[in-house]
Image (tube, rainbow, N blue to C red):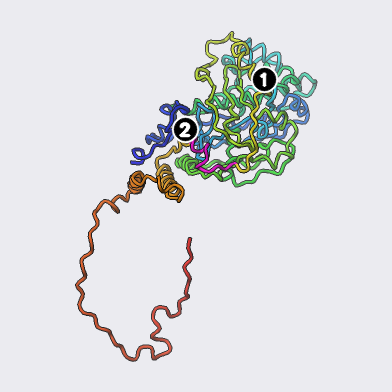
Amino acid sequence: MSRQIIHAGPMDDSLLRLQPFHISEHIWNEAEDRVLKVRSEKQSELRGGDIPAAVQDLLQRAGFMGMAQISYFPVDNHLISALVERWRPETHTFHMSFGECTITLEDVAILLGLKISGAPITGYASMDWGALVQRLLGMTPPEAMLVGGRLRMRWIDQHFSDVSEHIHSQEQLERYTRAFILRMIGGYLLTDHSSSFVSLRYLSFLEDLDVCGQMSWGSCVLANMYRELCVATNYDHKEIAGSGILLQLWAWYRFPFIAPPHPPLSTFHVPLGARWNYALHKPREETKEKIVKYRDYFDRLKREDFVWQPYLELLPTLPPYCLEDSHVWRSTVPLINFHIVEYHYADRVMRQFGMVQHIPAPPIHPEKLHDLSLRGKDNTDWSRMHVQFVQEWQSRHHRVWTQPACDTPHLSYSSEYMVWYRKHTRRWISPSSAKEGYVTDVLEHIYHGTSEEHRDAFDFTMMHESIGNCLQLRDEVSRVSFPFTPAAAAALPQAYEVQVEHIGAGRREGKGLSRRRRRVEHQGL
């Protein structure tokens, strides 16, 4: 019934053109709940303990020291799945009740400590992989450990778990550092859909660790995460790769209510993701209804439930590399990872930077980019294929958005932006949540329409219809569906006053039911 009365949106489909193909449409039509399998590493001996002192300097030079300080913890499949239901491939943002929000370059820098401003990760995606591993890691893996351009991570664990075997020369230490970084890349930065392999196309960027430290690994990780989120909005997809840890950390800081009860550690000079170390190794609660709870939570969000700027007070505690070129966080630029190009629309989420949110321009992302893959393109130089996007990225300092500072990020529903947004967004995922939202909308409309300023133009016919819909949604139509009939006059016998003698003569009698009861004054809500 609710699906026939309520229009979940968008009312204007010029923005969310892919709605008929989006998972939210399937959920609205009561399809079976889909819980994605989030692809990530199982805990590795290589990443299980403290960072070996011998490689800390090399990790710092390579730009991966911050990421190396984040320990393993499990990812919540249900939380990620519920967020995907609100991700929009058209805008690369989550559409919530209060407006758009997203994972930005700021989140990558502050949560993971990865470098943002630098050369993009792109070029040839094919080469002699066995020779590359031999040259940069010092040994050649057997054929069974190489599948195409991917290396089985179990082989890395077997040969590089014990750092004491790799400290006899600078060359050995550098090889160990490359293996350490490669294991992080395949484990939970740029995971593929096997959870067992890591792509060797990233290994070539680890040859010179100093040059590696000047590359934009942060934008590469975010590009991959955007692509995975976009693909996962297809209901028929059952898993998601990329960086689940990034998405989960983002959600915990933005929606504190769903974060674990364990407070983050008071650790300074590390990325914020490292503050959750050692507090999250308890088994996850994986009940079938958990995704429904997350979905209802997001459907019923109030504007105060989202933290627009969760890092402000923590910025002085971060290492300097987390804050480099912070103005680039507000840029609208293509994010590049070889064949993957996904746009970063900072202009759509200006409140995340403490600025006034304007009505954003339509996205400029070419839809055909979502279809690009590496299959059959062994000899492609992606830096040349995507030269237009590389040039846009290189001009990132000139593509930064600036707006006046906002007094509060919480906009009223009658503000110009929110009126535009509610017309263009998908407001609810679940029909059950939509019922409550619709009733609230009707009450809001009546409140404003019957105000002294607007009551002369108020449409009472529409109000009557809307209230009828509310009663129908509440299954209370019977209250108004029968005609009014007057009550018949009561034919009562003549009443006589009853006289009872001797009542109240005793000390304990005749006081009525109020005897020995405390009087309580009624208080309004």
Q: Is residue 108 left or right of residue 289?
A: right
Of residues 416 and 65, the one nearer the viewer is 416
Q: Is residue 195 left or right of residue 494?
A: right
Residue 186 visible, this orientation: no
User: Residue 197 placed where, x, y %?
Assistant: 58, 22
The CA span between labels 1 and 2 is 31 Å
Q: Residues within 10 Å of mark 2 (few under 14, many from 20)?
A: some
**In the displayed structure, would residue 503 be above or below residue 176?**
below
Quickly name the residue at label 2.
424
Q: Magenta residues?
A: 409-421
Of residues 242 and 128, the one nearer the viewer is 242
Amino acid at the residue labelled 1 = Ser
Q: Which mark is residue 395?
A: 1
Closer to the chain start, of discs 1 and 2, is: 1
Residue drawn at x 48%, y 63% as measured from the top left: 524
Q: Secondary structure at mark 2?
A: helix
Q: Residues within 10 Å of mark 1 (few under 14, many from 20)?
A: few
**In the displayed structure, would residue 445 be above or below residue 111?**
below
Q: Quadrant of the N terminus?
A: top left
User: Residue 61 placed where, x, y %?
Assistant: 76, 25
Q: Secondary structure at mark 1?
A: loop
Residue 407 visible, this orientation: yes
In the figure, residue 128 lies in which quadrant? top right
Discs 1, 2 touching: Cβ within 8 Å: no
In the figure, residue 4 lies in which quadrant? top left
Q: Is residue 259 left or right of residue 24?
A: right
Amino acid at the residue labelled 2 = His
User: Residue 503 placed where, x, y %?
Assistant: 35, 88
